[in-house]
Image (cartoon, rainbow, N blue to C red):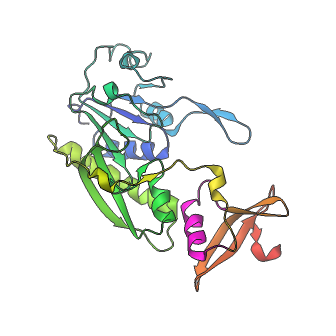
Amino acid sequence: MRSNLNFVFFGTPDVASETLEILKQEGFLPTLIVTSMDKPQGRKMLVTPPPVKVWAEENKIPYIQPGEITPSAFGTSPLSRGRLGRDAEFNLFIVIAYGKILPEKIINMPKLGSLNIHYSLLPKYRGASPVESAILNGETETGVTIQKMAYELDSGDIIAQEKVNIFADEKAPELRKRLVKIGGELLVKILQTPGWVGVKQDGSKATYCKKIKKEDGLIDLDGDAIKNYNKFRAYALWPRTFFFQNGRRIIITKARLEDNKFIIEKIIPENGKEIDYRVM
């Protein structure tokens, strides 16, 4: 393992744990992991640890789950006691889908600053849903950006970018999986060649994407077919696309675009099981 790069990894969901695994395979293990607190999930609202915490425990990496990020938080974990102190100096922070806005003093805390993987070609699609937004807007290409973080949202200097095509029928989970792999491998290249110099973003070309809400999945069956299909692809994992029939929510699980028509193939009626759409 490469022990000369003393870095802290911030992340919470699967995309972050998958990136950690890529780093591990190339010999990069964080000194400390910072992740979100366990939260109730599912219909039974069982308290569940985030994927990054699970990864940290499996790989015996010290981790903390602070409610608030402050410099003193880095010395509070029982797992890190004896290895890290409150005055520990870190070379680098790597932040991937952590879920909280980091204070400016935290971003600038390590010697080399903080790096972030963002799943778009910045300055396009700054914000919380770049993968979904690219598909939703009918883009045919997107990419991955590694940026040196700044306090303003996704406005940091660009260290590296890689462009990819979006396949015609590709859904958000499939595209995200490809981007996570590309982003992880690009990050490894950056870590292998320290001393990187970033290029400033052109803020005049910035576009923004919002955090997705459950109600965003509602579609108008009489609306534009291409827009409906793009929404189906973009929201395939969550919140999924749906419409209402007789006051009941119907989830679309399988659909296609054919002859510029949005054709629904399978659905899940409210509190039911998946069935063919023609059954209704």
Residue 156 position in % (x across, y down): 28, 43
Q: How many marks?
A: 0
In the orientation shown, which residue stands out farthest toward the left? Answer: 195
Is residue 22 rendered magenta in the image? no
Residue 196 vertical position relative to residue 274 in the rendered view, above or below = above
Indicate left or right for 27 with 77 as reference.
Answer: left
Q: What's the magenta region? A: 223-241
Q: Residue at x 29, y 59 (%)?
A: 162
Residue closer to the observer: 15 or 22:
15
Q: Which residue is drawn at 50% across and 35% down?
A: 54
In the orientation shown, which residue stands out farthest toward the right? Answer: 246
Residue closer to the observer: 55 or 13:
13
In the orientation shown, which residue stands out farthest toward the bottom? Answer: 259
Q: Is residue 185 visible to the viewer in this orientation of the structure?
A: no
Q: Residue at x 28, y 25 (%)?
A: 109
Indicate left or right for 69 with 7 as reference.
Answer: right
Q: Is residue 229 visible to the viewer in this orientation of the structure?
A: yes
Locate the N terminus by quadrant.
top left
Residue closer to the observer: 55 or 47:
47
Residue 164 position in % (x across, y down): 34, 65
Q: Residue 40, located in which quarter of the rendered image?
A: top right
Indicate left or right for 29 with 64 as reference.
Answer: left
Residue 261 position in % (x across, y down): 62, 81
